[in-house]
Image: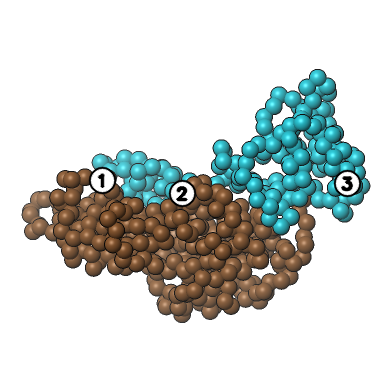
C-alpha cells in the first residue's frame, strides 16, 4: 500500500454517499475534475481520516514512446481493478464499481436493482437484472410523462419511500452489449428529487412476441420479487423485510411477461389507480 | 405404509419471520431463501413445534379449518417439507402422503372459506449476482459478475467469455 501511495499521492478527496465514505487518490490533480460525473448521485464531499473504500487512479500521461503501450491503472484498495490505454474506461469502471459498492454496503438505505419512475406523485418500481428490459420500460414511461428516478437502483429508506438515483439512462442498442448513455431530458423528462411512496411494482421481463396480460399478486409475493433483486438482503434480512413490507404496504404488484414497452405503459396510463387490478382491493385468494 | 412407531411430528426450522397482511414471510438464513406462506400454510407452519403429529395438529386447528379432516394439514406439511421449512426427519407421513389436488378438493367441504396452502420460495442473491452484470470481454474476477456466467482467460486478462 505504501508503494501505491507513492504513485498516487498528488491529490485526493473523499465523499459520502448513502452513509458510505469513499476516498479517491490520484497522481494528477486534474483527474479529480474528470470524476465529478462518475460519483454516485447524491454524493457530498466529506473530509474523513478513514474511508470504507479507497480508489487510486494512476494515469500514465508521460510522453508516448514509440513501440511502448501506455496503460492507465485503477486500483480498488490495494488491488488492480482495471487497466486500459483509454482513460475514459477507468472512469467508467470506477462509476460501476463505486455504485455497486455503495449499493451493497449502505446501512442507511436498501438498494434494489430496479428502474423507477414517478407517476402522479407516486413511484412505479420495475425490478430486474441486466437484459430484463427495465431501462426500455423506464424510457417509455418517461416519453409518456413520467419523472425519472433511476434505471438502475430503487433506493428505499426506512419508511419504504424510494429516493432518486439519477444517472443517465443506459440503453442497449440493437441487442449489443454496448450501452449508450442518454439523459432523462432526451425523453422529455426531468429528474425527480423527492422521496416517494410506492404505488405499483411491475415484476416483468421482456419476451419477444409476449403480450401484456399481467396478474395481480399478493404483497408478500411482491416482497419476494423485490428481495430477489436486492443487493444487501443477505447481510441484513430483517432490515430488508421491514423496509420492503413498508414499501409495498399500499401498493399494487403486477406480474407477467411483456412484449413492447408501449403496451405496458398504455395499460398503466389507462388504469392508473389500477384499483380494479389491485390484489388487496379485490381480496383475491390464491391457491 | 403407516409408520406407527415413529410418526411424523413436524418441526419448523429456526427462521426470521414477519407477518404481512394475511401472509407470513420467512427467511431461512442457512440456505438464503425467502418464503411467502399464505394464511393456511402459515397457520400450519406455526403449529409445527415438533411435539404433535399431523392428526393432532389438525385437531388443534379444527376451529380454523372448520373440519377435523387432516387433509389440509397433510397437504400443508408436504408443501412445507418440499420448501425446506421443516426440519429433516426420517419419519414419514402415512400412506396418504401423495396427495393430489383432486383428492384434496374432494375432501374439503368448506373450500369457500379456506384456501389451499401456498408456499412461494425465492433465493436471495449475493450482492454481485443482484447487480448489473458485465458484458462479453469485460474485465472480471469471477463468473457471477458476467452476464454469461463465465469468467476466463483471454490472453493475459480475465474477461467475460461466451
Residue ID for mark 1: A78
Residue ID for mark 2: B127
Q: Residue A69's x, y, as percent?
A: 15, 51
Which residue extends farthest top? B5
The chain assigned the colour brown in the figure is A
Q: Is residue A256 visible?
A: no
B2 shown above or below B120: above
| Residue for point 55% across, 49% down | A237
Indicate left or right for B139 with B60 as reference.
left
Indicate left or right for A30 with B143 as reference.
left
Q: Residue A128's x, y, as percent?
A: 52, 57
| Residue for point 25% across, 66% down | A34
- Mark 3: which secondary structure? helix
Quadrant position of residue B84: top right
Indicate left or right for B162 with A1 as reference.
right
Front residue of this view, candidates A285 and B12: B12
| Colour chain B is painted in | cyan
Residue ID for mark 3: B63
Separation of marks 2 and 1 at Cα, in angstroms: 21 Å
Chain letter belonging to callout 2 = B
Q: Mark 1 packing: few (<14 Cα in 10 Å), some, or many (20+)? A: some
| Residue for point 49% across, 67% down | A163
Say which mark, if any, is on residue A169: none
- What is the total number of numbered labels drawn onto the structure image? 3
Quadrant position of residue A18: bottom left
A168 shown above or below A20: below
Q: Nearer the viewer, mark 2 or mark 1?
A: 1
Mark 2 or mark 3: name the one nearer the start of the chain.
3
| Residue for point 88% across, 43% down | B62
Same chain, labels 3 and 1: no
Q: Residue B112's x, y, as percent?
A: 87, 54
Q: Mark 2 packing: few (<14 Cα in 10 Å), some, or many (20+)? A: many
Amino acid at each position: 500500500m505504501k508503494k501505491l501511495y507513492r504513485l498516487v499521492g498528488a491529490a485526493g478527496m473523499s465523499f459520502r454517499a448513502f452513509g458510505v465514505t469513499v476516498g479517491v487518490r490520484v497522481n494528477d490533480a486534474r483527474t479529480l475534475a474528470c470524476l465529478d460525473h462518475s460519483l454516485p448521485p447524491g454524493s457530498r464531499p466529506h473530509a474523513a481520516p478513514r474511508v470504507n473504500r479507497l480508489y487510486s487512479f494512476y494515469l500514465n500521461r508521460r510522453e508516448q514512446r514509440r513501440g511502448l503501450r501506455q496503460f492507465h491503472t485503477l486500483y480498488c484498495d490495494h488491488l488492480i481493478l482495471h487497466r486500459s490505454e483509454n482513460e475514459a474506461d477507468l472512469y467508467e469502471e470506477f462509476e460501476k464499481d463505486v455504485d455497486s459498492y455503495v449499493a451493497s454496503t449502505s446501512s442507511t438505505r436498501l438498494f434494489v436493482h430496479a428502474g423507477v419512475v414517478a407517476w402522479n406523485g407516486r413511484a412505479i418500481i420495475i425490478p430486474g437484472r441486466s437484459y430484463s428490459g427495465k431501462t426500455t420500460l423506464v424510457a417509455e414511461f418517461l416519453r409518456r410523462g413520467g419523472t425519472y428516478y433511476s434505471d438502475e437502483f430503487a433506493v428505499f429508506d426506512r419508511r419504504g419511500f424510494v429516493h432518486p438515483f439519477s444517472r443517465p439512462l443506459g440503453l442497449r442498442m440493437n441487442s449489443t452489449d454496448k450501452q449508450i448513455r442518454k439523459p432523462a431530458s432526451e425523453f422529455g423528462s426531468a429528474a425527480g428529487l423527492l422521496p416517494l411512496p410506492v404505488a405499483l411494482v411491475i415484476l416483468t421481463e421482456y419476451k419477444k412476441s409476449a403480450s401484456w396480460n399481467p396478474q395481480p399478486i399478493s404483497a408478500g409475493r411482491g416482497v419476494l420479487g423485490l428481495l430477489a433483486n436486492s443487493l444487501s438482503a443477505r447481510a441484513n434480512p430483517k432490515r430488508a423485510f421491514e423496509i420492503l413490507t413498508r414499501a409495498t404496504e399500499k401498493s399494487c404488484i403486477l406480474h407477467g411477461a411483456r412484449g413492447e414497452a408501449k403496451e405496458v405503459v398504455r395499460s398503466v396510463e389507462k388504469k392508473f389507480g389500477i384499483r380494479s387490478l389491485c390484489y388487496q382491493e379485490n381480496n383475491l385468494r390464491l391457491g | 405404509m403407516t409408520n406407527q412407531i415413529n410418526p411424523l411430528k413436524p418441526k419448523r426450522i429456526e427462521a426470521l419471520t414477519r407477518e404481512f397482511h394475511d401472509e407470513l414471510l420467512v427467511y431461512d438464513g442457512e440456505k438464503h431463501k425467502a418464503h411467502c406462506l399464505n394464511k393456511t400454510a402459515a397457520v400450519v407452519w406455526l403449529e409445527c413445534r415438533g411435539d404433535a403429529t399431523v392428526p393432532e395438529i389438525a385437531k388443534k386447528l379444527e376451529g380454523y379449518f372448520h373440519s377435523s379432516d387432516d387433509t389440509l394439514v397433510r397437504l400443508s406439511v408436504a408443501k412445507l417439507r418440499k420448501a425446506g421449512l421443516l426440519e429433516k426427519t426420517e419419519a414419514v407421513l402415512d400412506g396418504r402422503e401423495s396427495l393430489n389436488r383432486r383428492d384434496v378438493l374432494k375432501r374439503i367441504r368448506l373450500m369457500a372459506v379456506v384456501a389451499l396452502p401456498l408456499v412461494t420460495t425465492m433465493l436471495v442473491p449475493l450482492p454481485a449476482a443482484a447487480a448489473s452484470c458485465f458484458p462479453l470481454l469485460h474485465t472480471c474476477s469471477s463468473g457471477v459478475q458476467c452476464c454469461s456466467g463465465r469468467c476466463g482467460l483471454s490472453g493475459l486478462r480475465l474477461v467475460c467469455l461466451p
